[in-house]
Image (cartoon, rainbow, N blue to C red):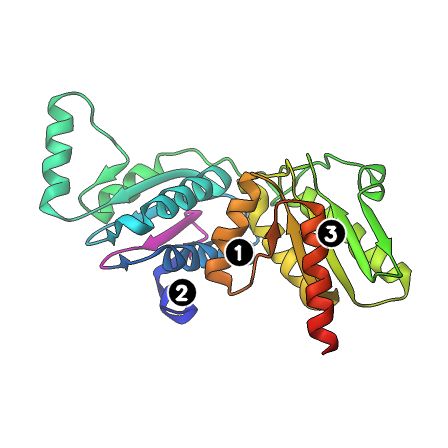
Amino acid sequence: MTTSDFDPRIRFDDARQTMEVDLSGLNFTDSAMVNRFYDRIEARIAQSGEDLWFFLINLHGLRVDSSAWIDYARRGRSLNMAHSMGTVRFDASPETARQIERDARTERFDPNLFTNRADALVRLDALPSRRRSGGVLHDPNYTLGDFVRRVHFDPEAGIMEIDFSHFTFFHSRDVGDFYDHIEERIADTGADKWFFLINYDGCRIEPAAWVQHAFRGKKLNLAHSLGTVRYAPGSETAEEIRRRATSQDFRPNIRNTRDEALARIDEMRSTAAA
């Protein structure tokens, strides 16, 4: 499935502050499809200009293969943590009706799962909005000094080294501030293209920052990278990068150590010169 297939399934209602996602009849056969779909949801949220929405999810006839389930659960959880003011699901299947009936009898009734869209909307309309007047506004967590020491250039080797180690991107403002600084530093060098060597050891990218991090990283690579290699031993962020690489058609180029990453850059340089 392509972006044109996904977009009709993602709809925004500004008056209700609702994003409706139609998963009905979908069969997520592998992790790549899951990640492509969630990438598109994140991109549409970014385009909306609002960070927070009520989520209305149509689950009718959805199938998720076992090989895709971990990514489906992980991406869904991250999306909710970052952008949901409340999530309500509906499924018209008889199985859902029986489940709701059983839960109601045992007083475990989940008010966020319904058998029809109308009841789900009633529930959403009763939830309080957490949006700020005036739109998205994040306070900065870092100063210029926090960024300066993390960006280094080796003109002889043609390498720009970015140190994200033990750094946390809490939200989109952190991402924007850091990447703005990187772009300014590149402009100051007078050289437009560099090999990128990025240390992700211990880096944390919170769900509220992932959309902007992916967008700014891709933009920076397209504009200024001769090749990008990352290193991060045992990093959760590295695993997330690998996961997203399956849907965004890029090589993650992640190595365990800096020396291994430098060796990979040497390989890339040799290939480019051949």
Residues shaded magenta:
12-25
SS for callout 1: helix
Q: Is residue 36 above or below residue 129?
A: below
Which residue sits at x=51%, y=45%? 239
The Cα–Cα distance between marks 3 and 2, rounded to whole angstroms, is 28 Å
Outermost residue toward the top in this view: 107
User: Which mark sits nearer the N-terminus, 1 or 3?
Assistant: 1
Write down the residue under mark 1: 48
Q: Amino acid at mark 1?
A: Ser
The Cα–Cα distance between marks 2 and 1, rounded to whole angstroms, is 13 Å
| Residue 258, percent from left and from top | 71, 47
Write down the residue under mark 2: 7
Which residue sits at x=67%, y=45%? 257
Left/right placement of residue 64 relative to residue 106 reads: right
The question of residue 24 being in magenta is answered with yes
The Cα–Cα distance between marks 1 and 3, rounded to whole angstroms, is 21 Å
| Residue 224, percent from left and from top | 75, 65
Write down the residue under mark 3: 179
The question of residue 101 being in magenta is answered with no
Q: Exactly how many numbered labels are in the figure?
A: 3
Dot 2: within a 10 Å radius of its alpha carbon, few (fewer than 14), some, or many (20 or more) residues? some
Q: Amino acid at mark 2?
A: Asp
